Amino acid sequence: MTIKDIGPEPQSFDLEQATLANTNYRSVAWSGKYLQLTLMSIPVGEDIGLEAHPETDQFLRLDAGRGRVQMGSAKDRLDFDQEVEDGWAVFVPAGTWHNITNTGDEPMQLYAVYAPVHHAPGKIHATSADAESDEESGNDEPPTWSVQPTHHPADKHA
């Protein structure tokens, strides 16, 4: 199943099927004016990467695999620690340091909803290294038609 990000237009698709079919680290599936949906596939033993988004709340849901969620108020104070698996949801408040590590024996398939929009519409990153490179070079910016905070502090990565 191929999903095309059509921007802030009405869209409908089988989200679980799209999530399970996604083999890329991150694929932006839908970008609205205020929020965004990405599909993610995390290889065995790898993680999303410890980060904090000062102005972005996130909702993540696992559709396959197992993992470990760690969150906290500082990158060296991850006092929330939870094992998760297929069907689990993770809620990340803005400003919270967080990471999800694949602890299973198959790719961890999940989707994430960001508010506000965080990535370029339709952006596909095959690997986490590709995503990091695009973010550092400025090739993964939210669209100009999305609503962003007036004060936009940079995301933090460990």
Image (cartoon, helix red, strand yellow):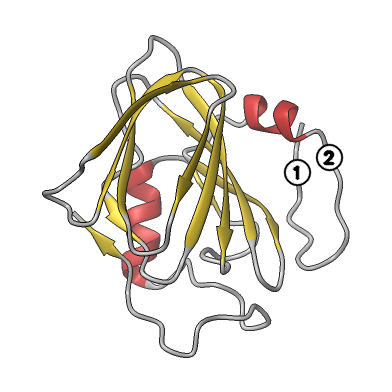
Amino acid type of the residue that numbered disc 1 sits on in the rendered structure: Ile
In the displayed structure, 34 sits above or below 62; it is: below
Answer with the quarter of the image where residue 36 lies.
bottom right
The answer to whether residue 137 is left or right of residue 122 is left
Relative to 7, residue 69 above or below? above
The residue labelled by disc 1 is 3
State the image coordinates of residue 129 (x, y, percent, origin top left): 32, 46
Q: Residue at x 20, y 43 (%)?
A: 78
Question: Given this view, does label 2 or label 1 mark the residue nearer the observer?
Answer: 2
Point out the tag, 2 or 1, that comes first from the N-terminus.
Answer: 1
**Quick one: SS at disc 2?**
loop
Given the current orientation, which residue lies at the most extreme front position? Answer: 79
Q: Is residue 26 left or right of residue 34?
A: left
Q: Residue 13 has which mark?
A: 2
Instruction: Tell me what residue is drawn at x 73 percent, y 56 percent.
Output: 5
**Relative vertical location of residue 19 with respect to residue 151 in this rendering, above or below:** above
Q: Position of residue 31 (x, y in %)?
A: 68, 62
Q: Nearer the viewer, residue 100 or 40?
A: 100
Q: Is residue 154 left or right of residue 79?
A: right
Q: Is residue 34 above or below residue 51?
A: below
> Marks 2 and 1: CB-CB under 8 Å?
yes
* 138 sits to left or right of 23: left
Marks counted in the figure total 2
> What residue type is disc 2 on?
Phe
- Image quarter of the C terminus: bottom left
Quadrant assignment for the N terminus:
top right
Name the secondary structure under disc 1. loop
